[in-house]
Amino acid sequence: MLVAAVFMVVVLVISGASFFSGQTYAAISALLGAFLLIAFGIISILNRITLEVEGHQVTLAFWPIWKKRIPRDDIKEMTMADLNPVKFGGLGLRRVPGRTWALLFSGGPGLAITRESDGATFYIRTNHATEAIAAFHGTQLA
């Protein structure tokens, strides 16, 4: 995201310079703008939400932008949740006041994972909440 912000600033600076200097800067500005548009399009197509419950940690990811590993001993609780995007301000990777994060492309069933260390809560939309909780507790579903 930082790289994208830097590119946007560069495009704005070059666009401003093109206003004063002629067509060369305008062409560079157009190429950088097209590059940014294509890059954001590719990221939008390729992004995905993942949840991995492993022996020593739980990993949440909004690939390729964000990844959070929570050690097993830092998880206070993992419960099922019914997620509504309106509660989090929309879809995607959302940060809400009160140490709350949400990863969702739609509303529906999911998980709420609360950290012991700071009380942060991570919500993730998944159709496999029951399986994730069972894997976390080390039990097998019938």
Image (cartoon, grey):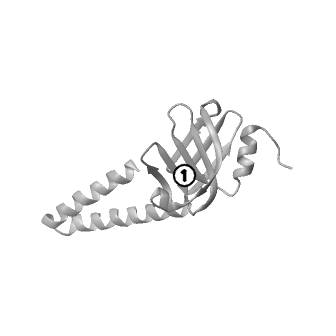
Q: Is residue 133 left or right of residue 81?
A: right
Residue 124, given in percent of the width and then of the height, sits at: 59, 52
Tally the numbered discs: 1
The residue under the point 82% across, 44% down is 140
* Nearer to me, 37 or 85: 85
- For badge 1, the amino acid type reads Phe
Disc 1 crowd, CA 10 A, few/some/many (<14, 14-19, 20+): some
* Nearer to me, 135 or 64: 135
* Nearer to me, 7 or 74: 74
* Nearer to me, 76 or 59: 76
Q: Quadrant of residue 34?
A: bottom left
> Please, which residue is most extreme toward the right here?
142
The residue under the point 71% across, 40% down is 136
Q: Is residue 114 left or right of residue 135?
A: left
Residue 17, given in percent of the width and then of the height, sits at: 17, 61
Q: Which residue is mark 1?
A: 62
The residue under the point 71% across, 47% down is 132
Residue 103, given in percent of the width and then of the height, sits at: 54, 53
The residue under the point 34% across, 65% down is 33
User: Residue 136, relative to residue 33: is it above or below?
Assistant: above
Residue 13, given in percent of the width and then of the height, sits at: 22, 57
SS class of the residue under badge 1?
strand
